[in-house]
Amino acid sequence: MIIKIKSDKERSKSIINLLKEREELIKTLNNSLFPTTMLENYYEIIKELITAIMYADGFKTIGEGSHKETIDYLKNYKEFSEYEINILNELRIKRHGSQYYGKKPNPEFVKQNEQEFKEIIKKLKDLINKKLQETFK
């Protein structure tokens, strides 16, 4: 469920600062050796960037289905295509399988979509930069 809250840009900034560690980790990983870690970290980076956008906008998700609703929140932004949102939902489903059922993801999924994930991350960062009027890398 998406609920309206007071805009919280400071919380958005805090979330962004925590993501830097995950981004550095991904740069060091080999997808063939660590597909689960790669998948989970791409997912967490993207989910948290969307969460930061939501906090800046004055929204948050709670309860069952909140991860799907977080990704679907991107439908509010013309910068993101239906294709990109579908890829992110596929990433969410695969992460859920690894996290809760011990299903090892196929390394090909991350390999085939890694460039797309990076482009989505860049778009999310550009969007949050506009909202926070600050630049981060």
Image (cartoon, helix red, strand yellow):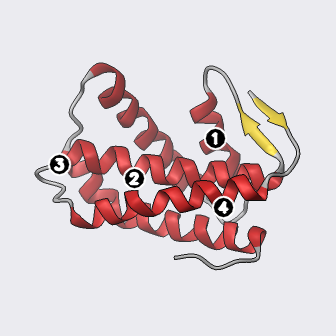
Q: Which mark is residue 34?
A: 3
**Would you place residue 62 above or below residue 23 in this image?**
above
Q: Earlier in the sequence, mark 4 or mark 2?
A: 4
Q: Secondary structure at mark 1?
A: helix
Distance of mark 4 from mark 3, alpha carbons? 29 Å
Q: Secondary structure at mark 3?
A: loop
Residue at the location (28% across, 53% down)?
110
Residue at the location (80% across, 52% down)?
8
Distance of mark 2 from mark 3, alpha carbons? 12 Å
Q: Identify residue type, mark 1.
A: Thr
Name the image quarter holding residue 118. Answer: bottom left
Is the residue marked by circle 2 packed among few (<14), some (14-19), or many (20+) residues within 10 Å? many
Q: Identify residue type, mark 2.
A: Tyr
Find disc 1 in the rendering and name its residue.
Answer: 70
Residue at the location (76% across, 76% down)?
133
- Percent across and percent down for residue 103 are 24, 27
Q: Earlier in the sequence, mark 4 or mark 1?
A: 4
Is the residue marked by circle 4 packed among few (<14), some (14-19), or many (20+) residues within 10 Å? many
Q: Earlier in the sequence, mark 3 or mark 1?
A: 3
Find disc 4 in the rendering and name its residue.
Answer: 13
Distance of mark 4 from mark 2, alpha carbons? 19 Å
Find disc 2 in the rendering and name its residue.
Answer: 42
Distance of mark 3 from mark 1, alpha carbons? 26 Å
Q: Earlier in the sequence, mark 2 or mark 3?
A: 3
Residues tagged 3 and 1 counted as in contact (Cβ below 8 A): no
Would residue 36 appear left or right of 115 to someone viewing this image? Answer: left
Distance of mark 1 from mark 2, alpha carbons? 15 Å
Q: Earlier in the sequence, mark 4 or mark 3?
A: 4
